[in-house]
Amino acid sequence: MGLCGAIFRLSGYILVALIAISVYFHLECLEEAKNEVKPQFNDKFELDATDITTELGFTKKGHDTKFDLGIDFATKQWCPCAAVKLLQFLLRSSTRTSFDLENNEMKNLTILDARKHKIGDFHKTGFTLVELDEEPDVQDWRTNGGIKGSEDAEVKKFHKLMEPHLRKMYPKVKRFVWTVNVVRGGNKPGDQPTAPAPHLDYHQDDEARLEFHKDKPPLPKWMNTPTEPDMLMGSFDSEDSKLGVLLGVWKPIFPHEICDMPLAVMDATTFKKEFQNKNEIAFNFGFFTFNNLNGAIAHSPLQKWYYYSYQNVREVLVFHQYSKNKFFANPHTAFFNKNCPKDTQSRMSVEFRVGLFF
């Protein structure tokens, strides 16, 4: 009884301490929510005013950045604020960035509506919009249907719908390799927030990527899970086919037509090597860390940005994440669209990446 009593007392002390800490974090969250300044829609909504002027954050030319994404980034979409702070406290994991005004800058720019402006061919601009005949018969957009994913994942239906369209873009493709699917803007475990800053998911310099991953593997070896960086470093190549292009595939899930936080892409013909900086990212999931060399973007007035106004759930944005032996990619970003109705619901979207092998 003495040992059991001691264990119960210790458990009680720990429980009381956790409750006290949780209450403290809850009060902290309430204070933060009270002081949070949220962007506001315009007083008057103009349906046809779809070229949007907004402010975005860029890195200055020649300045590299680092992002340590803590457990808060992985959980804040679905976990209560106090619980997120408790996890941060217990795991000593918080998001840290090197974004500062000395090496970064905010720029006002106009994002053009691709439906209204004449844009070039897909193989010149790097992006296009695919319209499906009907909304995909997929209810579960979260279960992974790509690398190391479930054979029964519903998103495989979407893969099959998209592949004929992708084959028209690249008739010589021999095989497709779909990677993990990610929901943004949702409120379930695994969902991620929107990414409102110009970026490339992968730096375009192959040698820089190999050097970065020498001591920072994408995932720990014990996980035995190949990743997109592994794909870019040749892990999926065979004697018959090698990676030629990695495409981004992005579509809304909810609402039927989106207005708030659409995805914008830069015309690839206006993106030059000197405006790509390194962005070292460590994504801390608590029990493991995902490392990746992203591309941070420097601003140039010559760059042209586009989006598709009121993109709906049957429309799929396709763009270039990476091209082998060719500097051809579309930096991209979500952005706050002030010209939306007051009752606009936040968008939820799903994104994929698919490797094309030739």
Image (cartoon, rainbow, N blue to C red):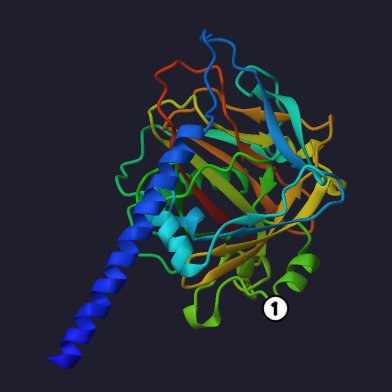
Residue on which the image places disc 1 = 215
Residue depicted at 32% across the width and 45% down the height:
138
Q: Nearer the viewer, residue 162 or 198?
A: 198
Considering the image in quadrants, where does the C terminus appear? bottom right
The relative height of residue 245 versus residue 316 in the rendered view (above or below) is below
Mark 1 Cα shell of 10 Å, populated few (<14), some (14-19), many (≥20): few
Residue depicted at 39% across the width and 46% down the height:
27
Give the x, y percent position of residue 20: 34, 59
Considering the image in quadrants, where does the N terminus appear? bottom left
Residue 289 lies in quadrant: bottom right
Q: Nearer the viewer, residue 239 or 266?
A: 266
Q: Nearer the viewer, residue 300 or 56?
A: 56
Give the x, y percent position of residue 149: 40, 65
Q: Is residue 311 left or right of residue 128?
A: left
Residue 143 lies in quadrant: bottom left
Residue depicted at 39% across the width and 43% down the height:
186
Check disc 1 and give the amino acid type: Asp
Residue depicted at 49% across the width and 23% down the height:
310
